[in-house]
Image (cartoon, coloured by chain):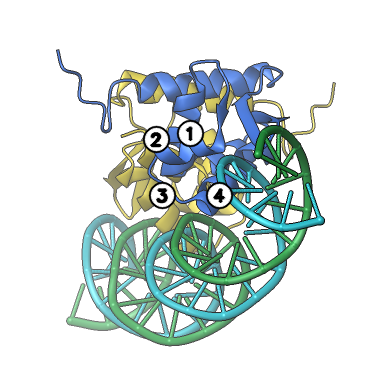
Chain colours: A yellow, B blue, C green, D cyan
Amino acid sequence: MILPVLLAIAEPTRLQALRLLADGSEHCVCELMCKLDATQSRMSRHMQTLKQAGLVVDRRDAQWVRYRLNSDMAPDVRTVIDAVLAAGAGEADERKVA
Amino acid sequence: MILPVLLAIAEPTRLQALRLLADGSEHCVCELMCKLDATQSRMSRHMQTLKQAGLVVDRRDAQWVRYRLNSDMAPDVRTVIDAVLAAGAGEADERKVA
DNA sequence: CCCGCATATGCGCAAATGCGCATAAAGGGA
DNA sequence: TCCCTTTATGCGCATTTGCGCATATGCGGG
């Protein structure tokens, strides 16, 4: 049952989205698509995938849909996610100033 | 740089192969293909993928090629792998007798 | 009630992925 | 040297995946 989770996070945009959500707060689709430079339909579908994998939950707030990490994730899965996020902590575009 | 690792393990056969290798010992391709009920070319290619991701190393031993987990894996990556294996510990086909 | 913003979704397409088949390559033994 | 076993790889095919475009849907404001 860990496979669906791996399939969900083994995609650049989804992994980045997960990183953004890792701050614990809520983010609407429009915010995510801006920050990740993705089109609207693309972002929406990726978030749907993450949701189906049980990694995130969404909440309707007026015309927005706010996504956040699923706090009810299975402990085992949570451990995997944390390990993945920790592994990619200071990488990619993140150019630390010093 | 964690993405390639995720792509490598987000596939049923490769994940199962990794589980088999998780015992720390060496396993040749023919053994893996038998245990995972895969054809030879399929197994060979999947192991190649795992190798490219830096998760396993191979060693030629006569006509066999022995695969084992890469002990020189980056610590961060190792943590992810361990978490994944722990998450799927007692699942799948593994029917515990009791 | 109509409009505008945010999000979801049907559709078709192009690229990527996994597979089997056949064949090559590597190595040991008679 | 020939043969058998084990593993790798070229090739074509079917499926899956990610994408954009257009459109539908949800929701608040005027």
Looking at the picture, how far across and down is residue A23, in whole percent? Answer: 51, 27
Q: Nearer the viewer, mark 2 or mark 4?
A: 2
Chain letter for mark 1, please. B
Q: Which residue is mark 3?
A: A47
Dot 2 and dot 1 residues touching (CB under 8 Å): yes
Q: Which residue is mark 1?
A: B31
Above or below for A43 versus A16: below
Same subunit: marks 2 and 1: yes
Q: Which mark is residue A13?
A: 4
How far apart, in angstroms, are the residues tagged by discs 3 and 2? Answer: 36 Å
Same subunit: marks 2 and 4: no
| Type of amino acid under label 4 | Thr
Regarding residue B2, the answer to whether it shows in the image is yes
The N terminus of chain A appears in which quarter of the rendering? top left
How far apart, in angstroms, are the residues tagged by discs 4 and 1? Answer: 37 Å
Q: Residues within 10 Å of mark 2 (few under 14, many from 20)?
A: few
Q: Which residue is mark 2?
A: B35
